[in-house]
Amino acid sequence: MSETKKTGTLLGMDKETVMHWGLRILFFLFAWLYLGIAKEDFLYKLQESNYFLYDHLFLQELASRKAGLIILGARFILQFCYYPLLGAAILALLLSGIEMLVSTTFQTGKKWFAIGFLPPAILLYLFNSITYEIYDTFEISYGICNIIGFYYILLLFMIYKRMKDSIVGVSILVLLTPITTIWMGPYPMVALLMFFTDALFRKKYTIAGITLPIGIVVSYLSARYASYHVTPGYFSYALLQPWPIDYYLTLHLKTIITHAIIAIVLTSFQLYKEHTIHKLQPFANIAIGILLMVGVTVGCKHHKTFDDELRLQHLAHIGEWEQMTKEMGKMKESTRVIAAYRTIALIATDQLVDKIFNYDYKYYHSLFPHYCEEVSYYPELMLLGSMPQISYRWCMEFFTDTDKKLYLVKHMALCSFINEEYELTQRYLRLLKETQFYKQWAEEMSKCLSNPDDYYKKYPYLVRVKAGIPTMERSGIFSGATTVYDRFTALPNITAIKRLYTRLYRRQLDKLERETLRSHMLREGKLPRYVQEGLVLKARLTNNMNILQRFPIEKDVYEYVTNFTDYYVKHYQEKDLDVKMKKKFGYSYSYFFSFGVGADLKIEKE
């Protein structure tokens, strides 16, 4: 009979257990695929901004920081997101482990197993709530710190459960727990909140009464010891690291509120379970678990432009230029970052002259601040714009003013290589050889330092970068492309084109006319189409067609601009004129001039 009973269930498990394990497998697959595929570019961006070396001095320095122990563990894990599916698998395992530990610690049983999925689902939500904070001075390991920190919270609560009825035992634990904020950040404070709510719900008012005062005082003293200069204004920073401070208000509030919710729900559930005979049906557990996963997906839905930015950055940093050009053509909306990376891809694939204005330049603006939106792409853009010295200086500024990032080290090595500063290049390469996944790239470049042509043959876009470097580059000026060249030096053609395109972008048609007259292109008898369009627009807007006699303007370009401007004048009061003209004329410089970003600007005249 006993043998018959065993074979009547799946592997000897009853229906509730089978459903529980089924939901566990479903959650693991959801977390893995969601992070590894839907958030692939986000994971890559996180690890790329993660400065982690295997040098013992670096590890010692990192561990000695405020919350250094938990940050050290989180940054170690974060580097594996270089391969997003691998990093996602590690994170999914950690999240699944939290569910199992919660189920054991709070004895959710077969009828309440959905409760165990609440903490990992909320932690996954917090992990994906990071948006433009990644561009600022933000502890990039924050998301993984939350996951590791929750293991520590559960460990402390398990110790508390063993001595919860002993005032002496709880007092000692409450005294020791906040001291560990020095190494573990604010997570011991969440554990103290769980001690307090558990004692409160069990009507152990004496224990509840000593938990908060002792916890707050010792936490303050610990924060003061760790930071040395804690004042009311800096207290939250000293206590909350690696949580975001109130400068990142949205993420700051989400973090505090969600951790408080987890603590209160878990401790109140335990009391509820002990005092009620009600049980949740197995299918209701499944439904709650699925709803949590759906909630994470919906709650972490960002505007498409953010995902597009991360996608282009990912492809740019691994040098997939052709793939960039394919994917950016599908992007319906634009931002400054997207526009910059489009330019980078077009330069790298030698399509800048033909396609730079063939995109929508009406920028989407988020309701939330885009931290460092205007400068996050400068190093790459300056380098591809044949200004490696300025690109290098931008990298140095970011490296010192924000947090250290591995992609900046890699970029500085590339800039110094193009500048033929090979000894400096070697120093950066030695640093990258201390990393897990940039070691191979560093060794490849090291082999080419004695014969740089081998590296240029492998990466031909760098040949165009080097060929476009002007004779004189004003490396001390952080400004636009038109201000960093010697005006009286013969510029390489591609550099002259970039300079003229900067005039087109800024609608400086007077300067465009003068500088085109001095360019090599005019003497060669052929101008890029966009330059021709700008000159025809200048002639039409100033009603001075004699301008065009000095330039080789093609007939079809002249007719296109004439038809465009005539249609615009005739229909300028109509609704959705930009949409109508896009369908009729397509993208062009004339369209950008009339409807692109800053289209309300007037033509600059001197």
Image (cartoon, helix red, strand yellow):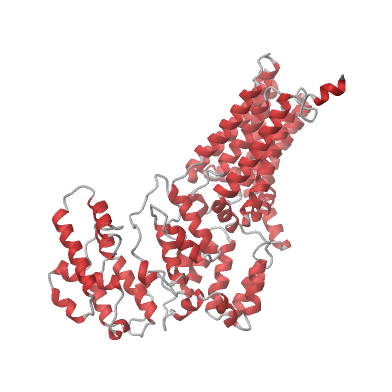
- The one nearer the camera, 407 or 163, is 407
Question: Residue placed at 46% from the left, 77% from the top?
Answer: 464
In the image, is 302 to the left or to the right of 221? left
State the image coordinates of residue 264 (x, y, percent, origin top left).
61, 27
Q: Does 601 sit above or below residue 417?
A: above
State the image coordinates of residue 599 (x, y, percent, origin top left).
26, 58
Question: Residue placed at 41% from the left, 81% from the top?
Answer: 470
Instruction: Using the rendered image of the protein, determine whether residue 583 is visible from the camera's viewpoint.
Output: yes
- The one nearer the camera, 364 or 375, is 364
In the image, is 504 to the left or to the right of 182? left
In the image, is 399 to the left or to the right of 226? left
- Of the 4 image quadrants, the one containing the N terminus is top right
Question: Residue placed at 29% from the left, 64% from the top?
Answer: 588
Q: Quadrant of residue 482?
A: bottom left
State the image coordinates of residue 224 (x, y, percent, origin top left).
63, 45
Q: Does 179 sit above or below residue 164?
A: below
Q: Does 45 sit above or below residue 534?
A: above
Instruction: Using the rendered image of the protein, determine whether residue 606 is visible from the camera's viewpoint.
Output: no
